[in-house]
Amino acid sequence: MSDDLGVRLVGDGLGVPCVDGIERSYLSLDAAASTNALPAVASRVQEFLPWYSSVHRGAGWKSQLATAAYEDARTAFTAFAGRTDTDDVAIICRNSTEAINHLAYRLGLRPDDVVVTTVVEHHANLLPWARFARRRYVECDASGTFGVDAVAAVLDEQPHPRLLAVTGASNVTGWVPPIDEIIAAAHDRGVPVMVDAAQLAPHRPLPRAADYLVWSGHKMYAPFGAGVLIGPRATFANGDPYLAGGGAVDLVDLDEVVWTDPPDREEAGSPNVLGAVALHAATDELNRLGWDAIRAHDDDIAHRLSEGLSGINGVRLLGPSAQPGALPVASFVVDGVAHALVAARLSAEHAIGVRHGCFCAHPYLLRLLGLTSPEVADYRAAVLYGDRRRMPGAVRASAGIDTTRQDIDRFLDAVARIAGGGPPPMPYDQDEHTGDFWPRTDDPAWSSPGRRLGAACARG
Ligand SMILES: Cc1ncc(COP(=O)(O)O)c(C=O)c1O
């Protein structure tokens, strides 16, 4: 097991103010939301910047170079997804959310078509399907997981589904479903599969058998606004693209358009070449580190995190208790302390950044928390009044390739202090609209109006 991959990200160790007036080194345990850049990513972007120019639109040397960098990145993304010997295309978009919306539009779904998905999904893999098709859901058990049989049973219901859209790893519990077996079960039934790899991509090789894949650069150390949708060329060869505009066409007259071939057909508008270059550098760097090393590090950190949290009195971990192979992601609640207050105290008193709330996975959280329908109705009514103070939720700590055992120990120590029941060193006020807590202090680092915008975690 490897404690430390020796990776430091841009910004790691920066000092931030705490409410006791002491500056502490910032510990981000929010990698499942967004990661800092790898130094190799930042330097590749820096090197490329002087050569930045229009892509697919210029005859000049720099445009040729920028176009080549963009297309090299595309090739790297298909290789990263293990698609070197297929006719799949990589469409470069903003993030996983855009990629899934893009695919939902492009599959030509009809209102009676069925897309099978699961209750553990991020909203990005629920809401886009709701726009175009009927959904059937794979339920989870009390521990927040499901097996291949449960997926197969839902796939076998009628009408026959057009697609299975399933996560490669949960952003809430870090659970990694048996994705290869799930894909095989779907393929046995003639159902294509889209894997939401937003969480999986920075941690594990992508499932080769998936028909469609999406992932986001900002969760894998390339925060420059690029994400990827991979799928068979044939899916995008006919019909109207998701975005219409320049770059996607061969010919336009006032009442006629001839769309060009994919992937350009799917990328109207000037492409984000800096994002593509950054994400290319991140894929190179993850390949260089190697999946075995990343996996060993993840296992070590995930184990320490979940064992440590389970050992703290008053802390309850959500999701399966023993999870060999899970990502280093843990969601938990602290008895008698609101999730928003735990997160606020970790930040204000300990300089530790985590997320709280429902993590853009409301159906999953409601199940993990075991809430009853009347309770949910009660929360819904309060939110409709603009009052998010009692929004249900949990606290999530999530680690990346830069996280060390010392980081986890520092976090566990802080959680133990909060769960220990001692009063906070100062009162905290809760914002009704966001549900966030804020320390009551005159310290300008914490009391200036700009800081009060808060995290608004409850909105996810
Ligand atoms: C599992 C999962 N899917 C999709 C998304 C959406 O990713 P993005 O915000 O990059 O579009 C996230 C983001 O947290 C996620 O965790």
Image (cartoon, helix red, strand yellow):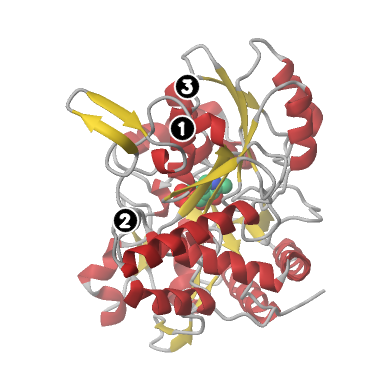
- Name the side, left or right, on which 209 lies relative to 172: right
Mark 2 falls on what kind of element? loop
**Residue 229: where, in percent of width, then height?**
52, 44
Of marks 2 and 1, which one's residue comes earlier in the chain?
1
**Looking at the rendering, in which quadrant would you find the N terminus?**
bottom right
**Residue 76: where, in percent of width, then height?**
58, 59
Label 1 within 8 A of ligand 1 by Cβ: no
Q: Amino acid at mark 3?
A: Gly
Task: Estimate the spatial distance between the alpha carbons at disc 2 and disc 1, rounded to whole Å.
Answer: 28 Å
**In terms of depth relative to the viewer, which is nearer, 387 or 79?**
79
**In terms of depth relative to the viewer, which is nearer, 119 or 156?**
156
Residue underneath mark 2: 431
Q: Nearer the viewer, mark 2 or mark 1?
A: 1
Residue underneath mark 1: 127
Q: Badge 1 local density, few (<14 within 10 Å), some, or many (20+)? A: some
Q: Nearer the viewer, mark 1 or mark 3?
A: 3
Mark 1 falls on what kind of element? helix
Residue underneath mark 3: 108
Q: Residue at x 48, y 57 (%)?
A: 71
